[in-house]
Amino acid sequence: MATVQEPHRVSAADFIRGFANWRLQSARSPVVVTHHGKDAHVLISLDDYRRLDGDAVDVAGATDRLQQSLAGLAESIRDGVILIDRQLRIVAANPAACDMLERPCADLIGAPLMTAAPRIEGSLLAHHIVRLIDHRERFAGDVPDVLRPRQWLRVDLLPAPVGGALILRDVSDALSGFAANDARQALLAAVEAQGEIGHARISVREAVEAANDTLLEMIGVDAAAIRRVRFSALLAIGYRAAFAEGLEELFRSGQPVQLASQIVTRDGDAIAVTLTITEVRGPYVSDGAVVLVTGRAA
C-alpha cells in the first residue's frame, strides 16, 4: 500500500545555512520552512510548480469556455433575452429579442429600453423593471401588449451584474387556445341548458366514451349502459352503414358531416333524428368525434 511522504520541516535559520542540501531535498519532496515554529513557506521543485501552474491555467481556460458556451446558448435559444444596465439602456440582446423588437441588434445596443419598446413605458411591467433595477426584485408573469397589441408575452425579470435581464417568450397562441377552450366550454353549457340537443363523444372506432343527459333520456338508458358501445349500434339497422361512411368521410376530410338517421330507444321505438358529426383533433392524430343528435320530423 502506498504511503504519503511527510514533507521535511526546517527552520528559516537552518534553511539559509543549508540551502544547497534543502534544495536537493525539495526535488524529492516538499520542504516546509518554519518561522518561530509555524509553517511559513514551502520549497518545491520546478516540475511540481509548473504542474500546479498548469492546473490553474486549465481552470481559467475551463471558466472561459463555460462563459463562451453560455453566451452561445443565449444566442441560440428561441426566447428573447435583453440585458439592461442601471440606466435602463440595452447592453446586449440575442437574435430572438431583436426579431421581437423588429430592429437590428446593432441598433439596439446603447438604446434606452423604453425607446426600443415604447409600449412598456407607463405599463405595469415598467414598474416591475424599476423594482428589478433598484431592489433586484424578480418577476415572472404573462403580460399583454408589451411589444404590440393583442400579443401576450411570458416575461421573466432576473437580476444581473450589469443591471437586469428580460427573458421574453411569445405565448399568444397558447393563451388563444385557452380562450378557445373556454368558448367551447361555454357553448357546451349553452347546449346543455337548451335541453333538446343530445351529444356523445366517441372514439375513432365509434365507441361511446360519454353522453349527455338529453341523449340518455332520448334512448331511455343510463350512462353505464352505452359506454364503450359502438354508436352505430344505437341506430336503426338501415342507417348504420350511412353513419359508418359519414364517419370515414369525416376523418378523411376533416369537414363536419350531417346525416338524416333514426335512433332506437330501449323500448324498440325508432326516433327520427339529425346527426351532426365533428372531429376531435389532437396535436398529431384524430382523437375521435362528437355526435350531436337533434330530433326531426319523421
Image (tube, rainbow, N blue to C red):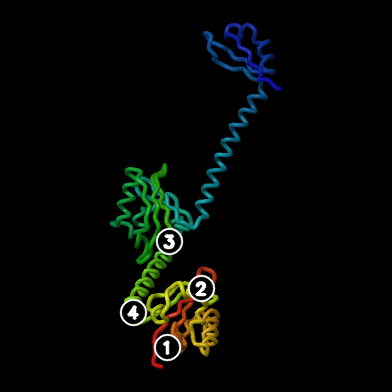
Q: Quadrant of the C terminus?
A: bottom left
The residue beneath circle 2 is 228
**Of label 2 and label 3, which has the lower sequence position?**
3
Tag shown at residue 170 = 3
Residue 34 horizontal side relative to residue 88, left or right: right
182 or 208: nearer the viewer:
208
In the picture shown, does residue 174 fall above or below 83?
below
Q: Residue furthest bottom?
A: 298
Tag shown at residue 74 = none
184 or 82: nearer the viewer:
184
Q: Label 3 near label 1: C-beta < 8 Å? A: no
| Kind of residue sitting beneath label 1 | Ile
Camera-nearest label, 4 or 1: 1
User: Residue drawn 50% across and 51% down?
Assistant: 74
Image quarter of residue 123: bottom left
Tag shown at residue 271 = 1
User: Residue drawn 36% across and 54% down?
Assistant: 113
Per the model, the C-alpha gap separating discs 2 and 4 is 24 Å
Camera-nearest label, 2 or 4: 2
Residue 30 locus on image (x, y percent): 64, 18
